[in-house]
Image: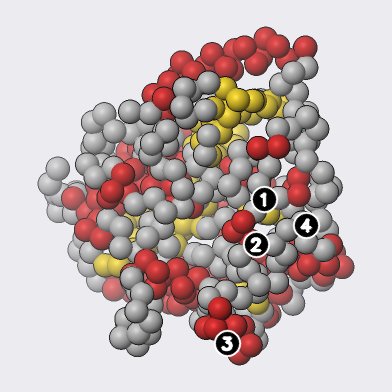
């Protein structure tokens, strides 16, 4: 499709968060300070039942940006490369680029910095390779920046061992850590794009909420450690839950101050949660600066803003840290869509999934979607009318665990790859147990529900379970 210069098309700003769970004031949680995100939500539509399709960063991003669900052979883990696994897919940024948009990748959008490079007019790399001559590939170089330490002893440890502590709070300015540099680049882009006659698809991929939890000290100081608590279910797994559903959180164990076996101490758990809270507030401040610049340049009147996370995060719920599970804490995400051309705002409780973002943005911007590719639905009707229905159910896949999420239930089967037979299963009734503390799959009163959900899972997602 050719871009028609006579037709004004909306811009898009994608605020792409890493590991952000919906633990914000706009979701009824008051512990985390996030005024900028809260303000954005007040102007747009906030979704309270949004879910990722894969609770793993690389795979989730690939799924969202192609609009395609994971299956037995596709979008399996963090190391997913879109150009290798779905080489013929028309990705979301590619669609915008082919329709006359300037497309810019800032920070972590695809998991790999060198994946689908042709999708973008500009891919930001924070430092020149020759300045940091570490002999790394683009992807390894980018990943090395995630461990963005600024306290001298942590820098020395990372250089010597390739790892460091799971959190840091250096007394530095906002612009020092990697996300501060991302925000500065996005602000520069906004100023340049103001002068352009082309619409833009601009991204800001923030990683501070990903391990290690590094942010300026002033954001740690906003929280009183005495007020930070572990979750109620921190020291037990769900009753009757299969052991294979519980993660041993190897991602966090790779950090030097985390034990290789067993649980962290209570004091370390509080420090980790403290660090997570601080990084969210740090990124919230940066988002505020970006949105302020958008308004200052007069672009807020013609820019659709989407804030979303690639998946949720466990903060010691059921003994678990990080993501990589089929549990609600790993899979539920915040989602905010602000459309300046619509007067609709408020809350939507409909069930939605990340593969819905592709067709939604395409419709809002008047772009024709690729045929026979997208698995999601456009949320435009839901955005305009709170009485419209979203999805009847959502598919979530992690490893050999396939979860069917409905408005009221979360049903998971762990399936053998060899013959597609079910190893074990679990069911959580979110009407009374959103924390998923009791697996009721074998309770007699849920027998009919289990049968129904099993049938839907295997009929509606037969291809995803059995693979190509």
Q: Are marks 2 and 4 in contact (CB under 8 Å)?
A: no
Q: Which mark is residue 172?
A: none
Q: Which mark is residue 263?
A: 4
Residue shown at 23% from the left, 64% from the top: 121
Q: Of the two numbered discs 3 and 1 on the same chain, state the one appearing first in sequence.
A: 3
- Secondary structure type for disc 1: loop
Residue bearing mark 1: 248
- CA gap, disc 3 and disc 4: 27 Å
Residue sticking out furthest to the bottom: 152
- CA gap, disc 4 and disc 1: 9 Å
Residue sticking out furthest to the front: 418
Q: Of the two numbered discs 2 and 3 on the same chain, state the one appearing first in sequence.
A: 3
- CA gap, disc 3 and disc 1: 28 Å
Residue sticking out furthest to the right: 226
Considering depth in this image, is 112 or 303 the residue closer to the camera? Answer: 112
Q: Of the two numbered discs 1 and 2 on the same chain, state the one appearing first in sequence.
A: 1
Residue 377 at x, y percent in the picture: 40, 31
Residue bearing mark 3: 156
- Locate the N terminus by quadrant: top left
Q: Of the two numbered discs 3 and 4 on the same chain, state the one appearing first in sequence.
A: 3
């Amino acid at each position: 499709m050719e871009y028609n210069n006579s037709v004004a098309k909306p811009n898009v700003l994608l605020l792409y968060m890493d590991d952000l769970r919906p633990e914000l004031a706009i979701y009824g949680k008051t512990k985390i300070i996030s005024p900028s995100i809260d303000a954005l939500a007040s102007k747009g539509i906030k979704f309270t039942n949004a879910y990722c399709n894969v609770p793993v960063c690389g795979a989730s991003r690939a799924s969202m940006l192609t609009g395609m669900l994971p299956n037995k052979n596709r979008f399996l883990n963090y190391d997913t490369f879109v150009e290798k696994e779905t080489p013929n897919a028309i990705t979301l940024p590619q669609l915008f680029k082919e329709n006359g948009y300037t497309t810019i990748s800032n920070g972590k959008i695809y998991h790999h910095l060198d994946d689908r490079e042709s999708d973008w007019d500009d891919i930001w790399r924070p430092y020149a390779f020759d300045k940091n001559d570490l002999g790394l590939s683009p992807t390894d170089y980018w990943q090395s920046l995630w461990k963005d330490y600024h306290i001298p002893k942590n820098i020395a440890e990372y250089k010597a061992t390739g790892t460091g502590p799971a959190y840091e709070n250096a007394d530095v300015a906002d612009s020092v850590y990697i996300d501060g540099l991302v925000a500065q680049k996005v602000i520069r882009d906004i100023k340049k794009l103001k002068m352009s006659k082309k619409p833009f698809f601009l991204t800001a991929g923030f990683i501070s909420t990903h391990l290690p939890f590094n942010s300026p000290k002033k954001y740690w100081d906003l929280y009183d450690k005495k007020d930070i608590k572990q979750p109620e279910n921190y020291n037990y797994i769900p009753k009757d839950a299969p052991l294979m559903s519980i993660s041993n959180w190897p991602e966090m164990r790779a950090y030097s101050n985390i034990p290789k076996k067993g649980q962290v101490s209570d004091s370390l758990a509080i420090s980790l949660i403290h660090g997570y809270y601080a990084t969210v507030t740090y990124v919230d401040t940066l988002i505020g600066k970006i949105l302020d610049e958008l308004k200052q340049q007069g672009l807020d009147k013609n820019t659709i803003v989407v804030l979303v996370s690639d998946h949720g995060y466990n903060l010691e719920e059921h003994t678990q840290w990080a993501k990589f599970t089929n549990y609600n804490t790993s899979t539920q995400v915040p989602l905010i869509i602000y459309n300046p051309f619509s007067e609709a705002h408020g809350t939507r409780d409909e069930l939605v999934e990340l593969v819905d973002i592709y067709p939604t943005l395409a419709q809002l911007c008047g772009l024709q979607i690729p045929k026979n590719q997208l698995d999601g639905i456009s949320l435009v009707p839901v955005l305009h009318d709170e009485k419209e229905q979203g999805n009847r159910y959502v598919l979530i896949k992690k490893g050999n665990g396939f979860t069917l999420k409905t408005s009221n239930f979360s049903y998971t089967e762990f399936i053998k790859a060899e013959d597609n037979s079910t190893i074990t299963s679990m069911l959580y009734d979110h009407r009374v147990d959103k924390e998923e503390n009791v697996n009721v799959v074998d309770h007699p009163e849920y027998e009919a529900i289990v049968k129904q959900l099993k049938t839907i899972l295997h009929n509606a997602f037969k291809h995803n379970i059995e693979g190509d």
